[in-house]
Amino acid sequence: GGKQQQQQQQQDGKDFVGFEGYSYDPSSFYRPPIWTGASNAADGLLGCQAPAADGLELHPAEPTLQELRAASFAEPLPRFPTEIHLQILSHVISSSGNTTCSFCHIFQLSTLSRVSRLYHALLQPYLYSTVNLNFNSSIKSSESLTHHWDDRSACLEHLRLASKRHQLELRVPLLIRTLTSRPDIAATVRRLVLPAGGTQTYLTCTLEKQLLPELVRCCPNLAEVDGVESLLARQFFSGEHYCFDGLEQQHGVLAKTLHETSTLRKWCWNVGNAAGSDFAARVWDQNPAMAGIGFVQAHKNWKALETLEIREVWNLEPEMLRGIVSSLPRLWKVVFVGIRKKRAGHGDSAAIFAALEALSDTVTEVEVGNIDDEAFLPAVGEWLRDRYDQGRPITSVRISQVPITTKNLCAFFAAIAVRERLRFYLPLLTRWGCAVQKLSLDGNLEGEYIYGADEACMELGGLQELGWRVRGGEMGLADGIRRGWFRDLQKLSGVEDEQVALVAREREVALI
């Protein structure tokens, strides 16, 4: 019987070819591997998500012979094509992702990955492409415990795991062990998500100087780190910790490691001072190895950076912004919102335009905003038109928190309206087009807007997606859509007015 069972198992393995050419055994004779705890690197997959990381079962009991026999005759995995299994898993993952409890989501994924070798391989990208360390037991559910002081909801099952500091110190070493022993898995990590709310809410000496820097160094293809956006706003410890006994004891190791990570493709600075005499203390925590590294020099190792966001940062001179964007050759998306010289107030349009003028040809997406100047909106339109005429068009632009009037809105539309030649008909025949393909406007309109008041912007052909969050301009937008001035519009978002929605549906424009 054992020989026949082995022959049948080998034949089943030959008949089924799974994900990317690998063979899997979906027969009833396949026994899933027994989980032996997170300390076993051979298990290879779950690291910090392992059940043993909860501290409840550090040394699980060995399975009995009866349990092994029961596992060997488990329900077989259906013989579906790999694509069907992918669709099943995608549906399960999307349904489990509806909860904001990170523990529920990651434990469901880890359970699925132990169903079979096929699911183990298919779920590995979901588990490790984004390493989510934002441990959070909050959940939106009627069956949850509500904290009366802030109306949060917490998952009752994982409420005991809500300490971010404790969970990080408990789980990150196990994750580092897995990534170190499995370089193939470490190479799949693209994004690292740290707890939200600021590093000062959870960071300890061990995390800042040892665990998190080592985790970043374990990921050779790390492209994005979330949770460190407020690095400019406050130093990690602000002199509250005194462990400066030598170079090995200095703080600022995490910031230094991020500065040296050359694979980063996305970075965000959110609120803070980009200069000042205390810059080294706030950002590098007086680490001697980072002496003389200012805000501009902080970007020098990020040659692979593709997305740069600078929001509400002050003490920024135009020369500093030119130096930053000119040193990043692979940028394709930039966000400049509220950047200025003074600590308080709105953004400086001169600084923003200095950065826009220095953008390379690779940049195709731009977001600007928080400028209290009515001339800013038409000026952005002129800049977009110049880029289009130079053969370096911006395909997507978002403008938010700017004053909007009928005059400057018409001037903006007139600026981005361009003449297009109809190549497939008459070479000399032209029509009105648009300098951008995706446009998003956010602000409050002063007065009543009538689209087409300026005859030069009667049509914006080529505009495919429009985000309209201009309060007070709904009637003018509905009139423009009804008359066909947005003839190529495919998607419309941000609209709450029923009349605009009705006209959009009549024109077969998808509402988002």
Image (cartoon, helix red, strand yellow):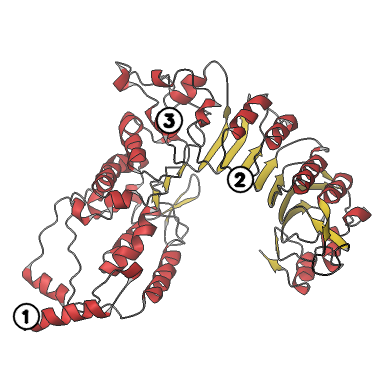
What residue type is disc 3 on?
A: Ala
What residue type is disc 2 on?
A: Lys
Q: Is residue 165 left or right of residue 40?
A: right
* Residue displayed at 68% across by 27% down: 318
Asked which secondary structure carries label 2, the reply is strand
Task: Classify residue 67 by image quadrant.
Answer: bottom left
The percent coordinates of residue 71 (x first, y second) are: 16, 73
Camera-side mark, 3 or 1? 1
Q: Is any atom of residue 133 visible in this view?
A: yes
- Rendered view: 358 above or below 343: below
In-front residue for pair 182/498: 182
Q: Residues within 10 Å of mark 3 (few under 14, many from 20)?
A: many
In-front residue for pair 389/182: 389
Could you say which disc has been placed on residue 189 in the image?
none
The percent coordinates of residue 298 (x first, y second) are: 50, 28
Task: Classify residue 2 by image quadrant.
Answer: bottom left
- Rendered view: 480 above or below 413: below
Q: Residues within 10 Å of mark 2 (few under 14, many from 20)?
A: many
The percent coordinates of residue 512 (x first, y second) are: 66, 63
Whole-number angstrom distance, CA of label 2 to CA of label 3: 23 Å
Residue identified by numbered label 2: 333
Whole-number angstrom distance, CA of label 3 to CA of label 1: 59 Å
What residue type is disc 1 on?
A: Gly
Residue identified by numbered label 1: 2
Could you say which disc has been placed on residue 255 in the image?
3
* Residue displayed at 74% across by 33% down: 349
Earlier-in-chain disc, 2 versus 3 = 3
Whole-number angstrom distance, CA of label 2 to CA of label 1: 61 Å
Asked which secondary structure carries label 3, the reply is helix
Q: Is any atom of residue 104 visible in this view?
A: no
